[in-house]
Image: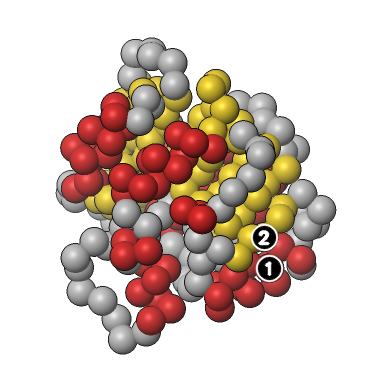
Amino acid sequence: MKVTTDACVFGAWVTSHLPDCKQILDIGGGTGLLSLMLAQKNNAAITSIEIEVDCFHQLQENIQQSIFSDRIKAVHGNILEYNTDLKFDAIVTNPPFHEQQLKSGNKSINQARHEDSLLLPDLFKKAAELIKEDGSFFVLLPFYRNDESMLLAKKFGFHPKQITKVHQSQNHNAFRIMYWFERKYENTNEDQLTITNSDGSYTEAFTALLKEYYLYL
């Protein structure tokens, strides 16, 4: 699985907002990108769950080769079947979201990128079950699913504390949206992040957000 720019943006964005935590759950751990970014900025124990077997092996390998291997636990399984006595301070997820869009011929990629194995309502329901009452729920989704996400958040008792729309450039409409949900009701802060300038260079905002993670910025 390739490391995508929007996943890097999401990881850095989460770490810039994440309160102090003891237990974090990464749903759809993938290659371990989010878990490893979170581990750099937080001393929490992180559980990273991944359903696709080849991706899980890559997740395991990346964690084991990192200096955070004692704090990140890789779990192979379906989050909907995951049972634990833990309640998490924070849940982060960059879920499969290409619902009803063209699939590749690769079953593993389809499972990791498409929604068949994890519907959005089920994700919100499971997060509501696993999160602490004062916990934080961070989600990255395509912008076109904003209305649906806000309805689901309300249904399962989440309120948006921060919403950030992500634009590829100033000439593009938002293509991703990042949410920070909590149980308690507060006024919602909304902003946007643009990745590139008109000449293709990274914007100052993008550079400031990612400079501690990218080697060359």
- Residue 119's x, y, as percent? 32, 54
How far separated are the C-alphas under marks 1 and 2? 6 Å
Protein image colouring? secondary structure
Of 58 and 208, which appears nearest the observer?
58
Q: Which residue is mark 2?
A: 74
Q: Position of residue 17 (x, y in %)?
A: 53, 30
- Is 206 left, or right, of 196 in this rendering? right
Residue visible at 40% across and 76% down in the picture: 109
> Disc 1 vs disc 2: Cβ atoms closer than 8 Å?
yes
Describe residue 87's horizontal placement relative to residue 190 as left or right: right
- Position of 137 with respect to 99 (left or right) is right
Q: Residues within 10 Å of mark 1 (few under 14, many from 20)?
A: many
As rendered, which of 95 and 33 lies closer to the eye?
A: 95
Residue toward you, 79 or 36: 79
Q: Of the residues under marks 1 and 2, which one precedes in the sequence?
A: 1
Please report the residue visible at 76 percent of the width from the left and 66 percent of the height from the top.
Answer: 64
Say above or below: 52 vs 13. below
Q: Disc 1 on helix, strand or loop? A: helix
Q: Amino acid at mark 2?
A: Ala
Say what amino acid the circle numbered 1 marks.
Gln
Q: Where residue 177 appears, x then y in whole percent? A: 31, 42
Query: Could you tell me which residue is drawn at 38 percent across and 81 percent down?
Result: 107
Q: Is residue 16 left or right of residue 116?
A: right
Q: Residue furthest top?
A: 186
Q: Secondary structure at mark 2?
A: strand
Q: Splitting the image into 4 quarters, where does residue 31 fall?
A: bottom right
Whether residue 157 can be seen here:
yes
Query: Label 2: few (<14), some or many (≥20) within 10 Å?
Result: many
Report if residue 201 is visible in the image.
no
Q: Which mark is residue 60?
A: 1
